[in-house]
Image: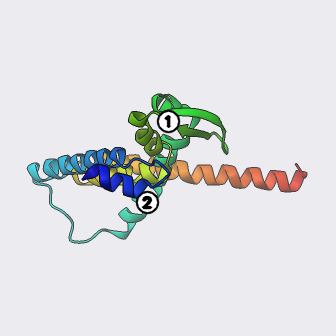
Amino acid sequence: MLRRVEHTYAGDGGRSIRGYLVAMSAFAAYTTGWALLVRRRGRPLPDRPVPWDVALTAVATFRLSRLLSKASVTSPLRAPFTTFVGPQGPAELHEEARSDDRKATVGELVTCPFCVSVWVASSLTAGQLLWPRATRTAMGALTALAGADALQLTYGALVDRTTGG
C-alpha cells in the first residue's frame, strides 16, 4: 500500500515520502520521550503559556534554528547529509541535500530553518518544563544573540547608506 501511495503522490517527480515518514516517526518518538520524562519527574504543566515565555521561545527558536541549519560554524554537523553550494548571507551557507535517498531527507531537514525550528521549539519547551532556570537562561542568550545580529545588520546597512558602499 505504501508503494502505491508513494507512486501516486510522486507522479513523474519521483519524490519519495519514505524518508519523511521516518522523520515524522523520529519526531514522534523524540517528543514522546520528552513527555514521558516530564511526566515521570512529576513536573506540572502550566494552565496556559505565559506570553513572555512564548516570545522568548520564539526568538530563541529562530536564532538556534538558523545557527543549526545555516551557520558556517555548524556546517560540519550538516556535511554528512549536504553538499556546499556557496555563501548565503552574512556568516550563512547555502547547502543542498545529498541525492542519496538515505541521506536526502536528513539533508533537507538540517538545511531548512523552518524544519529545524520544530525540533528546537519542542526541545526548548521540554527544557522549560524540566530545567526552567537553565533553559530560560540559554533562551535569553539566544535572544540577545538575535538582537545583536539585528543590530549588526542594521549598522552595516547604515554604514553602506552613508558611505555609498
Name which residue type carries label 1.
Ser
Q: What element carries label 1?
A: loop
Residues at circles 1 and 2 in contact by the CB criterion of under 8 Å: no
Q: Residue at x 24, y 53 (%)?
A: 1
Of 55 and 30, nearer the camera is 30
Q: Position of residue 80 (x, y in %)?
A: 46, 28
Tell me which label, 1 or 2, sits earlier in the chain. 2
Can residue 72 be spotted in the picture? yes
Q: What element carries label 2?
A: helix
Left or right for 111, reference 164: left
Q: Position of residue 36 (x, y in %)?
A: 13, 50
Name which residue type carries label 2.
Ala
Find the distance from the CA under tag 1 to the CA under tag 2.
32 Å
Give the total of numbered labels: 2
Q: Which residue is drawn at 14% across and 55% down?
A: 43
Q: Residue at x 10, y 54 (%)?
A: 42
Residue 99, numbered circle = 1
Name the residue tied to disc 2. 58
Can residue 136 be spotted in the picture? no
Q: Where is residue 78 in the image (x, y as percent from the top left)?
A: 48, 33
Q: Name the image quarter holding residue 55.
A: bottom left
Left or right for 114, reference 3: right
Classify 10 Å Cα crowding around label 2: few (below 14), some (14-19), many (20 and above): some
- Examine the rendered structure and indicate whether residue 73 appears above or below residue 33: above
Q: Which is more foreground, mark 1 or mark 2?
A: 1
Q: Where is residue 157 in the image (x, y as percent from the top left)?
A: 77, 54
